[in-house]
Image: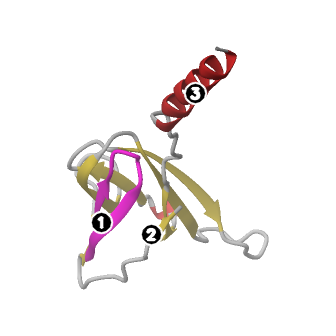
């Protein structure tokens, strides 16, 4: 009788563990040149709100006292739900009527386990297309 109870308990534990596979959401990071001293910064918009977006700017190493030096803006996208979206990154002056310099467009698909796949990327520069940095998906 004890063997039957132990086997039944083991079976319940195995089946309950199979249904609760936890996956860690993949994050997307995109590193872009930026210089906020000019009034420009990278703005993030999405066709479907699938990602939480965070941006961190780091000034490049330069001579002390040098003003107007640029740096790198790193945009991190963390998926919130599955679906497909276009993420548009616009380098612009954010105030009303501000000038737009460049735009990068990425298309991402997020699966039910919050794993990310990039399906397309292109740029639209004001004067000519700019290089489209490859995102890092981890």
Judged from the image, the secondary structure of the residue bearing numbered disc 3 is helix
Judged from the image, the secondary structure of the residue bearing numbered disc 1 is strand
Look at 66% across and 22% down and name the residue there. 3
* Quadrant in the picture for residue 42: bottom left
The crowding category of the residue bearing disc 2, from other C-alpha atoms within 10 Å (few below 14, some 14 to 19, many at least 20), is: some
State the residue lying farthest toward the front. 1
Look at 30% across and 45% down and name the residue there. 82
Q: Foreground residue, 98 or 74? A: 74
Image quarter of the N terminus:
top right
Disc 1 versus disc 3: nearer the observer: 3
Residue labelled with disc 1: 106
Lower sequence index among marks 2 and 1:
1
| Left or right of 117 on screen, residue 7 | right
Circle 2/circle 1 CB separation < 8 Å: yes
Determine if residue 104 is in view.
Answer: no
Look at 35% across and 56% down and name the residue there. 93
Range shown magenta: 104-123
Residue labelled with disc 2: 135
Judged from the image, the secondary structure of the residue bearing numbered disc 2 is loop
Question: Which numbered marker is on residue 13?
Answer: 3
Q: With respect to residue 48, does 130 lie above or below? A: below
| Left or right of 58 on screen, residue 33 | left
Rendered location of residue 24, percent (x, y): 53, 46
């Amino acid at each position: 009788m004890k063997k039957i109870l132990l086997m039944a308990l083991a079976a319940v534990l195995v089946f309950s563990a199979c249904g609760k596979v936890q996956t860690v959401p993949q994050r997307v990071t995109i590193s872009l040149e930026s210089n906020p001293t000019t009034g420009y910064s990278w703005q993030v918009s999405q066709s479907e709100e699938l990602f939480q977006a965070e941006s961190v700017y780091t000034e490049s190493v330069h001579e002390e006292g040098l003003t107007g030096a640029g740096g790198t803006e790193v945009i991190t996208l963390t998926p919130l739900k599955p679906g497909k979206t276009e993420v548009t990154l616009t380098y612009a002056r954010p105030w009303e009527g501000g000038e737009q310099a460049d735009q990068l467009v990425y298309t991402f698909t997020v699966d039910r386990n919050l794993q990310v796949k990039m399906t397309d990327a292109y740029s639209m520069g004001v004067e000519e297309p700019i290089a489209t940095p490859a995102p890092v998906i981890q």
